[in-house]
Amino acid sequence: MKLPPKITIADHFKDLEDKRVERTKKHKLIDIVTIAICAVICGADSWVLMEAYGKIKQEWLKKFLELPNEIPSHDTFARVFAIIEPQQFQNSFLNWIKSINKITEGEVIAIDGKTLRHSYDKGKEKGAIHMVSAWATNNRLVLGQCKVEEKSNEITAIPELIKVLDLAGCLVTIDAMGCQKEIVKSIVEKSGEYIIALKKNQSKLHNQVEEIFKTAISKGFEGFKHSEFHTNEDEHGREEIRHYLMLSDIEDKIDPDKKWVNLQSVGMVEYIRKVNGKTKVETRYYISSLINDAKLLGESVRSHWGIENSLHWILDVAFREDDCRIRKDNAPQNFAVLRHIAVNALGKEKSKKLGIKSKQFCAALDNDYLNMILECI
């Protein structure tokens, strides 16, 4: 039986440049990449486990891979993924995403960063790698990722990630690190809307927004276009109250020189948490291109944390990303892409109502189930 994903995987990764010298090409590059994808889907988190997986599944893999010299060694996996050009690997990932997923109008795309904690190399004085990812909160898919260069930060990486995303009709949410004029401009240029957290890193704007809300509230919103939305959740002895407030038509008051592209409104979220008789109150501010929609502000701010709960948590718990000690050359960045491929494929397979970790276990035991997952690639 020929496996349907054979052509699909080969098509997605056919443009990868094989940088190995000719005498070391004992194994086909597409075979190495395919085994790696299958192994990571099934829970492998090291080159040694990747080799072990290949040897155990060798007869099954031979049904759709050439394997001219059997299964590559763990050293071969390590060497190949260390020299694969990360941008090419990323582009292959993006081609796959575009082929299986059409972003719907109004999709909330959360952009956030995560550090691969054990990817540092003290011997070479290399710090841990930090990756910025884009997460489609409704479709629950990783749309892309970009490495933050050493001695830099997310401010430089986010625009590079935005360049490769299709944002038309989508709403982009970013934490306060992304509250930068050029980032806002790049989102609007890609026909996207935005909600971006505002903190003291933009002290002048933050103070202006804080003051305008104080003024509007003290005047009972007279002369201000506003909308409000409330939620109240009470469970497990914990009560959480969220009050969302949005002011529109305020551009002339806080940005008369129009330095912030398409700034239409500002948002305030008052978060009240009551636990064991103790009350905690927190206020957060946002800038946005939306017009007077506090309900959408609330839904979008809440869904932004999906990248923490549905992506970063899965990467840490199911894929043990923070424990991974792969650190040589391009390998950490490329392995991060492998994890994202696995997260998306496992998430798109809906026949079993299981968590990601359970799906990995089933895929490792059942080749037919792994076939179903691979058909999502």
Image (cartoon, grey):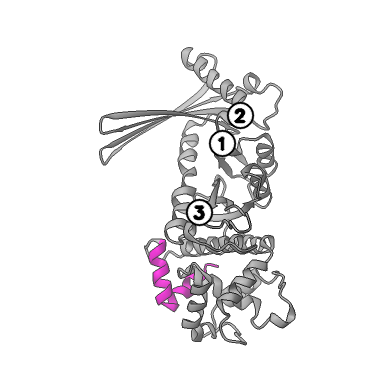
Helix, strand or loop at disc 1? helix
The amino acid sitting under disc 1 is: Ala
Which of the 4 image quadrants contains residue 176?
top right
**Does label 1 or label 2 sit earlier along the sequence?**
1
Helix, strand or loop at disc 2? helix
Most extreme residue toward the right is 22
Q: Is residue 293 above or below residue 251?
A: below
Residue identifier under label 2: 202
Task: Give left or right: position of 18 versus 223.
Answer: right
Q: Which residues are magenta?
A: 356-377
**Does label 3 or label 2 sit earlier along the sequence?**
3
Q: Do the numbered discs 1 and 3 sit on residues whose CB atoms are within 8 Å? A: no
CA gap, disc 3 and disc 2: 32 Å
Residue drawn at x 48%, y 75% is: 371
Residue identifier under label 3: 139
Q: Do the numbered discs 1 and 2 sit on residues whose CB atoms are within 8 Å? A: yes
